[in-house]
Amino acid sequence: MSDRKKVLLVDDDADFVEMNKAVLESRGYEVATACDGDECMQRVQTEKPDLIVLDIMMKSVGDGMFVAQKLRKDDATRQIPIIVVSSVNQKPPFNIGPDEGWLPVDVFIEKPVAPDVLVDEVKKHLGEAGTRIERGTP
């Protein structure tokens, strides 16, 4: 059994997934991937990730938003940090950010994201750079 933290990377952009998977693995993380919300929910059950990096627009416009809402409503997954990395705000009329209501995530990052920015956020939300962030019940 590995002591490495596991990150679930969820995006329908194969290039984004492969590049960031390589970056995260090079920093010592175990990385599982999914290409849409349905596969994400399956992977959460089988992989038990420590953190999820999630896109908003995949199979449907709000695919990632609905996944985040489901994860936060489930006692088994409520504490998993969620980092959204999306270009959704580049498509009018969207202006999305983290919110405890309709987008209950820990942080929202605009694409494109520099690898070091993503790694820093992963470290921060896994408690590897300071105090671990605890999420309460919504």
Image (tube, rainbow, N blue to C red):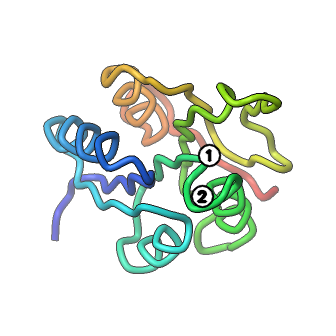
Judge left or right: residue 22 versus residue 123.
Answer: left
- State the image coordinates of residue 38 (x, y, percent, origin top left): 54, 73
Quadrant in which the N terminus is drawn: bottom left
- Three-letter amino acid code of the residue under disc 1: Glu
Q: Secondary structure at mark 2?
A: loop
Out of 114 and 123, give the one closest to the viewer. 114
Judge left or right: residue 94 versus residue 15.
Answer: right
Q: Residue at x 13, y 37 (%)?
A: 26
- State the image coordinates of residue 94 (x, y, percent, origin top left): 78, 32
* Tag 1 residue: 134
- State the image coordinates of residue 10 (x, y, percent, origin top left): 44, 55
* Tag 2 residue: 79
Q: Residue at x 59, y 67 (%)?
A: 77
Mark 1–mark 2 Cα distance, whole angstroms, equals 7 Å
Q: Earlier in the sequence, mark 1 or mark 2?
A: 2
- Three-letter amino acid code of the residue under disc 2: Gln
